[in-house]
Amino acid sequence: MGNEKAGKKMGQKEKEGEADITFYHSDLVEVPTDGSPPFLKGYRCKSCGQLDFPKLSICPGCWGAEFEMVPLSRKGTLYAFAEVFLGQPGMTYPMTIGYVDLPENIRIFAQIEGKAEQFNCNDAVELTIGTIRTNRDGLPITSYKFKKAES
Amino acid sequence: MKLDRDVYIAGVGETRFGKHTSDFDVLGRQAALQAMRDAHIEKPGIVQTAYVGNVQNGIVTGQMVFKDLGMCGDLAIINVESACSAGGMAVYCAVKDVATGTADISIAVGTENHSLTRQAGTAFAGATGDIETMQGLVFTGKYAMRANRYMFETGATPEDLAMVTVKNRRQATHNPHAWFKGNISIEEVLASRMVASPLTLQQCCGISDGAGAVVVCSREMTKNLGIQKPVKVSGAVVFSGPYHNRPRDLTGDDITEMAARRLYEESGIGPEDVNIIELHDAFTIAEILYYECLGLCRKGEGIKFLRDGESTYGGKCVVSPRGGMLSYGHPVGASGAAQIASCVKQLRGECAGYQVEPVPAVAMTHVTGGGMSGTEHAACTMHMLTKAWQA
């Protein structure tokens, strides 16, 4: 995973023989190459100031079309979660999923690393990066996830 | 919607629900024929417009349903899709045609062969290509999160949730259209395999096939057709899911609350006056949340409402008298129309073996549809139906 892979969309293949680690979308998450921790990318509307994730094509508040990228907090609160035993093709089950509320008043849906039994509603969680699913060619897709926050 | 003139339901039809080897068009035709015969229509050329709700069976589904009935030609057939709300929305469109005078008589069909089109071992996601779908969300998971949060906030238990399946299956016992029915214990519900914790298999609607159909018309047309027991459409609303990616209360449902408020205003009928409801009980937790969202009880008191028997025979409001989606299964595009068909039969007193007594005078239907990131559901369709004849 890394920045050089960012910008590729699901389904795009590397050249033959090259390891493929496909990133879901570069507008969503930044994995700095200097080793500093990854962060989700929020977008603040330059005309009305509304902050959104994910990036929208136009601001739903004022229809402004210019945004500035704002790194979102890496830690949040697990509002709700569940362990899912059956789901979409290309994913591994059982899987823990959850809604994470960030201090910026934004809610993120994501996969949660770890068994569901170790979580409670309102637990502190933090951002991590990992494989979320495979694409139609069976190749892994890398994106954001959350895990129990290190205290 | 504002109803510029009165709209009545003249006829309804529904197939048996369950796994069918017949495709959606056959099922849709069965329900449509039943509904038209029920409305004393015995030949093509009477119905003026048609709306067909379907989700997964491809393109030109409505024309596929009506071509063998000799109805294609000057019949304007419009195909309607909004995931689980499609069938309800088709009825809404037919009602609108009659209310505005675009047509004097219109038919709505909801039909789906779900089992022939789903890959075994996969679950249904709320929207194609949506970010939450990409990250792994399926409906079972979303409702499981709602359930966990509801239990966290209210202290409700898995046993409490399981009671919804027990109630709805019991209510469906003698309903020939229902699939899963009869006695099942709380223990059996909880012992079935886990689908998305805390929801076990018996707390999730089955992947089933079926169809429902509804003929709506003007007052004059009910007279021309000789309809003895016309049911009045006292309100019809469609809402789209308000979008925002801020935290929201998953133990509520913004779109259902908005739609219900509007329906109560427009019909002049409040929750205390509604005798029966078919709602979107795709999962046990959903029925409990909707007791609260629809105003049948106060917020946080859904379990008490259920435990006190207020949502079954003899209670304040019989919820899912046909057995709901937990008994019929949920062929997504069909359910909304089938709910209305079943409610009409209840109002007419035609549900031998599962008839609500005293025969209800007011019925309400509620069906949500899909779900994108930043919404609870993509759509919500509700109808208020009232008895429009003197006994």
Image: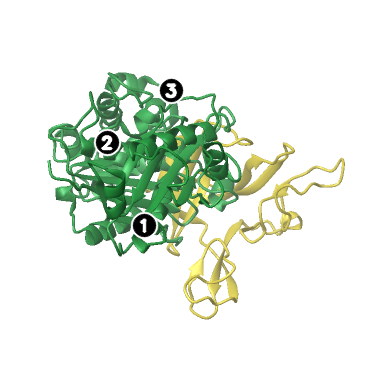
Front in this rendered view, residue A54 or B347: B347
Q: SS class of the residue under badge 1?
A: helix
Q: SS class of the residue under badge 2?
A: helix
Q: Earlier in the sequence, mark 3 or mark 2?
A: 3
- Any mark on residue A41, and which? none
Tell which subunit mark 1 falls on. Answer: B
Tell which subunit mark 3 falls on. Answer: B
Residue at the disc numbered 3: B193
| Category of crowding for the residue at label 2, using alpha-carbon neighbours closer than 10 angstroms: few (below 14), some (14–19), many (at least 20) | some
Is B344 on the left-hand or right-hand side of B27? left
Query: From what the image shows, is residue B155 above or below residue B173?
Result: below
Determine contact: label 1, label 3, CB under 8 Å: no
Is B346 on the left-hand or right-hand side of B309? right
Point 38% across, 26% down: residue? B202
Q: Earlier in the sequence, mark 1 or mark 3?
A: 1
Q: SS class of the residue under badge 3?
A: loop
Query: Do marks 1 and 3 share a chain?
Result: yes
Mark 1 → mark 3, Cα distance in angstroms: 47 Å
Residue at the disc numbered 2: B345
